[in-house]
């Protein structure tokens, strides 16, 4: 780490815009803290470009506040982007749907790697623009989405639904989901019928074109293995993009297992700041499903924390006693917040009860 001074650093717009901007209030609070206490943590740079600390850099330049820098040793920008997303998803207070919006900016990198991986397979002789080629691309896109969902720590079904809303031109649904008036599951169900018709028409056209041109059509699988009952069943017995069969979904409420995510936007920070949609869609909320979704999202966060502490970063081998003490304090704080929430729920008076 370098000595503190007012460095002149380079800004890569792709790295700068990778993450949602701070709101006006958040930026003002950060500015007040830096002016009062100075810049305590280093800015991370890669080959002279800022990777972490764009907002601090602007403020430090404005007020001539010295800061230290730490150099990242990654070989290419895609590795820097992965490091930025991984760190920010865990550090910033982003809602799950914001995590999807952030992670989507990393999609081109994943798609490029998927193409490279597919280049080693023996299906490269499939003619382009054929039915087989179309299915191959869809399979590749599906795998890319699964990898992105894993990076965002969001279930694949919820990720797919969130992205569908994110890409939709239905601004009313977007805003309702963003404001919390409509769950992702409800928003997706509003948009989905139109989407399914479009997909059906595209697939039909590809099929007809292939017949006319005498091109081979690679048949899609007719069955899928349910992750719950472990049985191989017909595709028709599954909901779209679901890994659970319809029968199992009745018992485990699978349609909403990851659907507590209630924000969406391409420019997340801007939309959150400017949103003025009134809350008018409470009827879309199903209490039982919403509570189960909340429970599952918290459970996922706990599992992700466990994996980051003990597996991915092996933090116990790097911890000082102070780090351990802080970790215990943080866990106690979280436990306390959950207990407060539990106590508030226990005090709820149910209609009709004395």
Image (spheres, grey):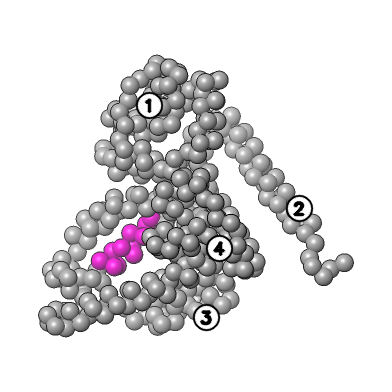
> Would residue 47 be seen by someone viewing this image from the given angle?
yes
Residue 316 appears at what percent x and percent y? Answer: 52, 38
The magenta segment? 137-148
Q: Earlier in the sequence, mark 1 or mark 2?
A: 1
Name which quarter of the figure residue 235 lies in. Answer: bottom left
Viewport quadrant of the N terminus: top left
Mark 1–mark 3 Cα distance, whole angstroms, equals 54 Å
| Residue 144 within the segment the image draws in magenta | yes
Q: Is residue 194 above or below residue 280?
A: below
Magenta span: predominant SS is helix
| Left-right relation of 75 to 149 | left
Q: Earlier in the sequence, mark 2 or mark 4?
A: 4
Q: Earlier in the sequence, mark 3 or mark 2?
A: 3
Task: Quickly name the residue at label 4.
Answer: 182
Q: Secondary structure at mark 3?
A: helix
Task: Quickly name the residue at label 2.
Answer: 343
Residue positioned 53% across, 60% down in the render: 176
Mark 3–mark 2 Cα distance, whole angstroms, equals 35 Å
The image's mark for residue 70 is 1
Camera-near label (1 vs 2) is 2
Residue 19 appears at what percent x and percent y? Answer: 41, 43
Q: Earlier in the sequence, mark 1 or mark 3?
A: 1
Mark 1–mark 4 Cα distance, whole angstroms, equals 43 Å
The one of 18 and 201 positioned closer to us in this rendering: 201
Mark 2–mark 4 Cα distance, whole angstroms, equals 26 Å
Viewport quadrant of the C terminus: bottom right
The one of 352 and 24 positioned closer to us in this rendering: 24
Mark 4 neighbour density, 10 Å: few (under 14) some (14–19) many (20 or more): many
Task: Quickly name the residue at label 3.
Answer: 247
């Amino acid at each position: 780490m370098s000595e503190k001074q007012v460095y002149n650093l380079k800004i890569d717009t792709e790295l700068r815009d990778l993450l949602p901007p701070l709101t006006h209030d958040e930026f003002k609070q950060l500015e007040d803290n830096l002016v009062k206490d100075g810049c305590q943590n280093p800015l991370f740079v890669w080959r002279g470009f800022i990777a972490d600390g764009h907002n601090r850099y602007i403020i430090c330049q404005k007020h001539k506040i010295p800061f230290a820098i730490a150099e990242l040793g990654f070989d290419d920008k895609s590795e820097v982007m992965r490091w930025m997303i991984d760190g920010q998803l865990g550090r910033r207070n982003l809602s799950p749907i914001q995590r999807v919006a952030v992670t989507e900016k990393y999609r081109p990198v994943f798609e490029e790697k998927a193409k490279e991986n597919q280049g080693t397979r023996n299906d490269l002789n499939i003619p382009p623009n054929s039915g087989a080629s179309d299915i191959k691309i869809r399979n590749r896109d599906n795998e890319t989405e699964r990898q992105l969902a894993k990076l965002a720590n969001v279930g694949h079904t919820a990720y797919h639904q969130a992205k569908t809303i994110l890409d939709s031109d239905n601004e009313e649904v977007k805003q309702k989901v963003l404001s919390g008036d409509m769950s992702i599951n409800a928003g997706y169900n509003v948009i989905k019928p139109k989407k399914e018709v479009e997909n059906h028409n595209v697939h039909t056209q590809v099929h007809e074109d292939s017949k006319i041109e005498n091109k081979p059509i690679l048949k899609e699988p007719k069955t899928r293995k349910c992750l719950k009952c472990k049985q191989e069943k017909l595709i028709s017995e599954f909901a779209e993009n679901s890994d659970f069969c319809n029968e199992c979904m009745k018992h485990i409420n699978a349609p909403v297992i990851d659907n507590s995510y209630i924000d969406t936007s391409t420019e997340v920070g801007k939309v959150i700041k400017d949103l003025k949609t009134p809350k008018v869609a409470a009827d879309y909320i199903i209490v039982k499903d919403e509570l189960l979704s909340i429970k599952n999202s918290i459970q996922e966060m706990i599992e992700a924390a466990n994996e980051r502490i003990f597996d991915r970063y092996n933090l116990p081998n790097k911890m000082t006693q102070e780090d351990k003490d802080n970790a215990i304090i943080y866990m106690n704080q979280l436990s306390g917040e959950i207990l407060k929430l539990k106590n508030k729920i226990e005090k709820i008076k149910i209609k009709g009860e004395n």
